[in-house]
Image: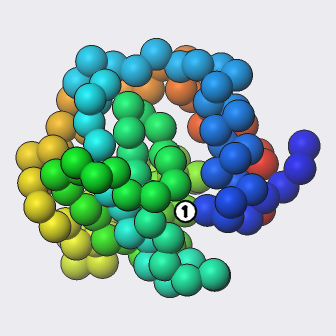
Amino acid sequence: MASHDFLSDEWFAAAGAIFDEISPPVPDAIADLVINFRIKDAPHGDVEARMQAGRLLQGFGDAAPTTVNIPYEVARQMMVEQDPNAGMQAFMSGQIQVEGDMAAMMSMQAAGPPSPESQQVAARIKEMTA
């Protein structure tokens, strides 16, 4: 399996292909949710992305009620390493800033635990991330 730098164009394409192949179910709580992420200090500059229906996509969503500013290393720990404590620690220490509707961000927790398919997507993305 090819290895791709986290948040590069190739990474987003490969992650999207994995998501499409496995097609995990999207919990109702996040089916219509769009949250923007500004990942700061990535190797090639800041990256704009969005979580939409449980999937990380390139670019901001026009109607997203929330933008989360997050350091690259924290984003990697949360999104690739699947470390749930990394986000909480970074938020509590002020490394993560939230603009807009905080309740929308908190609704991601209402999605519940990841499905077996979602866990499979996460494992494959971790394997292909440099």
Instruction: Pinpoint residue 3: horizontal percent, then vertical percent.
Output: 84, 55
What residue is at 19 percent from the left and 66 percent from the top?
Answer: 98
Whether residue 29 sits left or right of residue 15 in the image: it is left
In the foreground, 7 or 113 = 7
In the foreground, 87 or 16 = 16
Residue neighbourhood size for the residue with mark 1, other residues' Cα within 10 Å, grouped as few (<14), some (14–19), many (≥20): many
The type of colouring in the image is: rainbow
Instruction: Pinpoint residue 13: horizontal percent, then vertical percent.
Output: 70, 47
Whether residue 129 sits left or right of residue 19 in the image: it is right
What's the residue type where badge 1 is placed? Arg
What residue is at 89 percent from the left and 50 percent from the top?
Answer: 2
Disc 1: which residue: 76
In the foreground, 72 or 34 = 34
Instruction: Pinpoint residue 91: horizontal percent, then vertical percent.
Output: 25, 67
Whether residue 78 sits left or right of residue 113 in the image: it is right
Q: Is residue 108 depicted above or below 129 in this figure?
A: above
- The image quadrant of residue 21 is top right
Whether residue 38 sits left or right of residue 107 in the image: it is right
- The image quadrant of residue 124 is top right
What residue is at 68 percent from the left and 60 percent from the top?
Answer: 9
* Total marks in image: 1
Image quadrant in which the C terminus is located: bottom right
- The image quadrant of residue 85 is bottom left
